[in-house]
Image: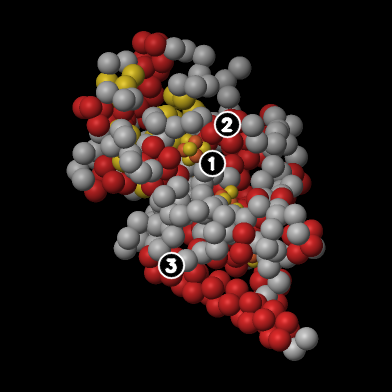
Amino acid sequence: MDEPQRLGDFLLRRGISRRAFMKFCTAMASAMAMPPSFAKSMAKNLESAKRESVIYLSFQECTGCAESLTRSHSPTLETLIFDFISLDYQDTLMAAAGRAAERAKEEAIKRAGPGGYLVVVDGSVPLGAGGAYSASGGKTSLQILGDTIENAAAVICVGTCSSFGGIPYADPNPTDARSVSQLMEAGKVPSKPVINVSGCPPIPVVIAGTLAHYLTFGRIPELDHLNRPKPFFGETIHDRCYRRPYYEEGKFAQAFDDEGARSGWCLYELGCKGPITYNACATTKWNGGTSFPVESGHGCLGCSEPGFWDGGSFYKPLSAGMLGDPGTLGAAAAAGAAVGAGAAWAHRRRNARAKEEG
Ligand code: SF4
Ligand code: SF4
Ligand code: F3S
């Protein structure tokens, strides 16, 4: 039986009730910080959204991004959105291999026509050794990326590796890895609209939400200065962290097993990078809304920011310039570090005064 071409019909056939669909739209509207009325128009547009052809390319990556998607709590509407899109090529998940897989990709691109398909990329692209570090079907990753995105409507970079280089890009970057945006800026591949859904790995709900936004409005969402969708990356982890009141009170855990940690105090002094990290973990959380790193007792590592592997110790309090390429995150990092350092300093002063007083 052919799959329905409209999302509303598709969900109906999968047994998704109108009530569950509305709940999903309301949750998405809230995650995107939109007013409740937005959920209604989203539902209306999404119901009649057409199947979108998507080609998913994997380059220098650890498969964590794909794992994050496929191992997400299921079955949910998020995963059904992925089922609904026409995932015409994903070399880890698809049954076809070798020439048959490459043929499927070429046919999907031809069928969709110019501007008729999206390309999702995870992993960075190596330029070293003529691209020999990552090749498939006799083509380097650079060639594959360039050929595939030539007629794409947009490129969605899933994960920090494709968005900003990630682990392969970390010093000393032995493969001369590049992010998709860097390759476009250098004119090595055709320039296309890029959406960076960063994170190591990225949050499945955020990827689904970005796709849902595209399906709903037929255009990409508003982006920040690093091309991340603002509805999900508009605030820092710190902005929405439930431990924030302790931060404001100057109550900081000093060790992972001390009284402060057990009482749920702020993890700033244990290296939390929440003040300079833009992502939706504190609101959407992970694993079906169960928890997120800070809630499980570990500071945020800053995994959705450029250069987080090289930025400094994960377990040292923030200091200026710890995260980010010079000129991109510098100002935000400096501001976050200054705010955090101010709170921590005030806390130490209070402790010192208390000791002096007796
Ligand atoms: Fe793996 Fe993280 Fe890179 Fe995704 S972003 S491929 S999880 S290293
Ligand atoms: Fe939460 Fe970290 Fe900010 Fe503390 S520093 S309030 S633990 S995000
Ligand atoms: Fe990453 Fe920080 Fe979220 S480490 S998973 S952005 S809490």
Along the line of sight, the residue nearer the viewer: 142 or 154: 142
| Residue at 28 percent of width and 37 percent of height | 176
* Residue 124 at least partly seen: yes
- Is the Cβ of the residue at disc 1 closer than 8 Å to that at disc 2? yes
Q: Which image quarter: residue 26?
A: bottom right
Total of numbered circles in the picture?
A: 3
Q: Is residue 170 left or right of residue 262?
A: left
Position of 180 compared to 346: left or right?
Answer: left
Q: Residue at x 70, y 33 (%)?
A: 74
Q: Is mark 2 within 8 Å of ligand 1?
A: yes
What's the amino acid at mark 2?
A: Glu
Residue for badge 2 = 67
- Secondary structure found at label 1: loop
Residue 23 at x, y = what percent? Answer: 72, 50
Q: Furthest-bottom residue in view?
A: 357
| Res. 320 mark | 3
* Image disc number at residue 282: none
Which residue in the protein does label 1 denote? 201
Q: Is residue 198 above or below residue 121?
A: below
State yes or no: Cβ of the residue under disc 1 lies below 8 Å from any atom of ligand 1. yes
* Dot 3 beta carbon under 8 Å from ligand 2: no
The amino acid type of the residue labelled 3 equals: Ala
Q: Residues within 10 Å of mark 1 (few under 14, many from 20)?
A: many
Circle nearer the N terminus (3, 1): 1
